[in-house]
Image (cartoon, rainbow, N blue to C red):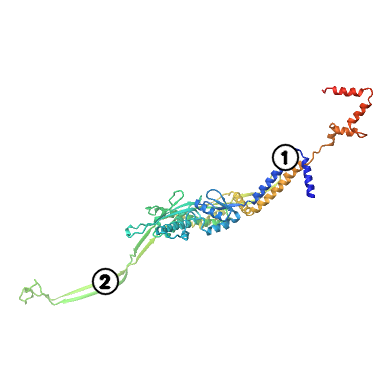
Amino acid sequence: MAFRDAWLSLRAVISGLTPGRRMALMLLILGSMAGFFWLIFWAGTPDFQPLYTNLQPEDAGAVVQRLKEDKIPYRAAGANTILVPRERIFETTMMLAGEGLPQSGGVGFEIFDRTKLGMTEFEQNVNYQRALQGEISRTITRLAEVRTCRVLIVMPEESLFVEQDRPASASVQMELHPGKKLKQQQVQAIIHIVSAAVPDLSPEDVTVMDNFGNLLSAPRGAGGIENSVTRQLEFQQRMERIIQQRVESMLDEVLGPGKSIVRVSCELDFKRQEITLEQYDPEKVLRSEQKSRSLSTESGAGPSGAPGVLSNMAPGGRGAAAGEGSLTREQEIANYELNKTIQHIISPVGMIRRISAAVIVDGTYTLVKTRDKKGKETETRQYTARSPDEIGSLVKIVRRAVNFDPARGDAVEVINLPFQPELRGEEEEASMDWRSDVSSFLPVLKYLFAGVVLIFLFLMVLRPLIKWLTSKPVIDGRMLQQLPMTVGEMERELGEGGDGSVSSQLSQAIAADTDGSAARLIRDLIREKPE
């Protein structure tokens, strides 16, 4: 019964509206229903977030096919990005990772999980090479700087003759993330990973190139000169960074974080020298002495003359005997000890020749209360420079930290300058924190926003419009009195004493007219033309 009364009341209200208001009310109802359903649809739509980006086309196709099989909603943003609902990102990632997707542009050893009967040895070797290339590519892609990687390996067939054997070779092509760069140490690590994974592959036969065509590995025949220079530069930069961090950590403890800027430049000596010295002490030291003396006496001379029979004959022959004699022989041997010093000196590579350090320190700030023209009190930061004694103390501290040596020509400068406040960085950090906090409540905020919008539209738009459409026009009574009376109002006013109709009164007046004056008056009124 109540519903019937409400329906009748609504029909009465709508029937009392003008055609224009009816059309406006109909458009308002349709627009409100469309907006309501759109808000419900928008609030119920899942929040899609990237599942994978920068995928290879074949990997993207495999991932999409797997999502279709599991009936997981997804969206494709471009040819290499796939979006899934936020609440299903981690679940989908683990599910695809368990199935080896994405394959990062190559297949690994899982290719042998689906072996075929009747596979030839050539096919097995090709699959093994593909699997090895894919596994090496996946290993290199795990580096933070590498986006994608492709490895090509050439493994010649073994020959029966040693002189006909050819070594294996490999090439690595990498696509780096924007703004990223590989260090020479990382390039060498990639080269050794590839050479260790492939049999009979030496590091010299591995070529590494980035996506811009730059050769990252040492070219053949370079003799290691480029690598040596690169290592020297990296060693110098590492030395400067170590000294700089040492000074900065010390100043941060004294002045506070962000109150100092330190830059260090080192000049190193990369000459390699080997020196061997042998030194003898000129002072002699007698170690041992040996003396010997011999005396011999001879009674006569022996046979003399030409050898033969005649020289051995009796005294009457040609050989005559000599008289008696003595012989004395003395020998003295002295051994002296000589002090001998042998030095083998190898100068270390990378000795510091000279150190230059530049340090800028901030002053101190105090809050000062000031009043503007309107009398409002504000606080401002007033800068105060550091005293010369304090700067001198900082110079001594920095010199100690860098191992200052005036004989090398080292230089240390400490300057006091005001720093600009880092308000922008703090605001950016605060905004990032705010965004991260809001993103976690985004699903709830969507429904809350939809409810607020509906309430606002009902209170501020729908309700005033409905009230205006269904209200009757209100006219002031004094204005109505100034308007001319209608026929019905004249009849009601004249008919208060009897029959209120004007026609009946007029017929009565004509019946009572005996001299015909009323008839002439009516005839004149009818004949009279309006002006």
Nearest the eye: 227 or 312: 227
Q: Nearer the viewer, mark 1 or mark 2?
A: 1
Can residue 41 be seen here? The reply is: yes
Q: Is residue 97 left or right of residue 378?
A: left
Q: Position of residue 59 (x, y in %)?
A: 51, 53
Can residue 265 be seen here? The reply is: no
| Residue 316, placed above or below residue 223 | below
- In terms of sequence position, does the residue under pointer 1 or pointer 2 come before the other? 1
Inspect the image, locate mark 2, and give the three-letter code of the amino acid beneath it: Ile
Q: Is residue 421 left or right of residue 526?
A: left
| Residue 393, placed above or below residue 16 | below
**Crowding at mark 2 (Cα within 10 Å: few <14, some 14-19, many 20+):** few
Q: Is residue 471 left or right of residue 212?
A: right
Mark 1 — residue? 23
CA gap between label 1 and label 2 equals 142 Å
Nearest the eye: 48 or 197: 48
Mark 2 — residue? 333
Residue 524 placement: quadrant: top right
**Crowding at mark 1 (Cα within 10 Å: few <14, some 14-19, many 20+):** few
Residue 122 placement: quadrant: bottom left
Nearest the eye: 396 or 458: 458
- Residue 218: mark: none
Q: Position of residue 481 (x, y in %)?
A: 85, 34
| Residue reaching furthest to the left | 316
Please report contact status of discs 1 and 2: CB closer than 8 Å, yes or no.
no
| Residue reaching furthest to the front | 511
Q: Is residue 43 left or right of residue 82?
A: right
- The residue lying at 37 percent from left, 58 percent from top is 157
Q: Position of residue 296 (x, y in %)?
A: 18, 76
| Residue 293, placed above or below residue 488 | below
